[in-house]
Image: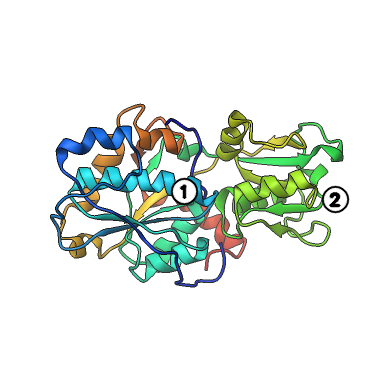
Amino acid sequence: MSTRRVARSGGPGSRSLLPPLSRRSFLAAGAALVAGLPGCGRSAAVTSSGALRVGAIPDQDPEVLQRLHGTVADALATALGLEVRYTPVTDYAAAVSLFRTGDLDLVWFGGLTGVQARLQTPGAEPVAQRDIDAAFTSAFVVNASTGLAPSDDLTALAPLRFTYGSETSTSGRLMPAWFLREAGVDPQGFPGGPGFSGSHDATLALVASGSYQAGVLNSQVWRARSEEGAVDPAVVRYAESPPYADYHWLLGPQTAGRTGVPDLRDRLVDFFTGLPAGSPVLDLFGAGGFVPVRPSDHDRIEEIGRELGLVS
């Protein structure tokens, strides 16, 4: 059941969320079963005082996220001997809010939402990022009817109806807006104002339909959908952005105490960085491996976020 689809990483700080999906720990003898049956949620005795509650920014289709983070939850339950629950959230801002209030413990954030969550939650600690996240990129796409051929000239996008992804997406809004501005294009000055699709997949759909003539999304999602043959022929990749730091796992400051695992962060780092090549988690994340991450890795994201008014 191998797939190259990746997780999608929105809106008012609502604390509403969908019903949690329990991922309980199971015996070490079942570890091989997790690799063969990702996301099956098998269970065994809980060895700690509290479940580890995992979340993620909703940047892709819900079923993609469910499989990805259900698989992560199962693997973490085995490795840590904890009950692990993946809880979908409604939008990007909800993920930040629920992390700040302690309702989510370990969250897969984009660069910008990770910075927002860390600044709002003193003591929060970055855990790990994929090997591809230190030099991530965005893909600018256009509808074929525009007649635009691939180019590095972003000024050609200025007169087009244009959509970003989520308002607080790093790869679908923050960094593309920055690169547009650097190229002399007002990132808010598109005809009728820019759109905000809410996710990378939705951006592709809107450009394909002609609702917007151009848009921007996570390059990894673009490549994954292209490999699957899921990109409408009406959508043309126009340009790729320069690299920047993006997605990473962030751990809440009260989690170790609440779960009864004092060295939880170290164990999480060991788990993610120790995943073997070809594991279901790495396959679903579209990565060759995970590496440690530091708060300073996202200093530029914080700077740009402040300059564009998305970090206060």
Image x and y of residue 222, in percent: 61, 37
Of the residues shown, which amino acid type is indicated by label 1?
Leu
Q: Which mark is residue 159?
A: 2
Front residue (pair 82, 160): 82
Dot 2 and dot 1 residues touching (CB under 8 Å): no
Residue 225 sits in quarter? top right
Secondary structure category for the residue under label 1? helix
Whether residue 43 sits left or right of residue 132 in the image: it is left
Front residue (pair 212, 159): 212
Residue, far top? 277
How many other residues sit within 10 Å of disc 1, few (<14), some (14-19) or many (≥20)? many
Q: Is residue 7 visible?
A: yes
Image x and y of residue 254, in percent: 25, 65
Of the residues shown, which amino acid type is indicated by label 2?
Pro
Judged by depth in the image, the label closer to the viewer, 2 or 1, is 1
Q: Residue at x 52, y 48 (%)?
A: 8
Vertical side of 288 occupied by 205: above or below: below
Residue 10 sits in quarter? bottom right
Could you tell me how far apart the alpha carbons at marks 2 and 1 are, in whole angstroms?
A: 34 Å
Mark 2 vs mark 1: which is more N-terminal?
1
Q: Residue at x 21, y 44 (%)?
A: 78
Vertical side of 239 occupied by 57: above or below: below
Residue 189 sits in quarter? bottom right
Q: Which mark is residue 65?
A: 1
Image x and y of residue 239, in percent: 70, 36
Q: Is residue 300 visible?
A: no
Image x and y of residue 76, in percent: 27, 46
The total of numbered circles placed on residues is: 2
Front residue (pair 174, 83): 83
Vertical side of 37 occupied by 81: above or below: below
Secondary structure category for the residue under label 2? loop
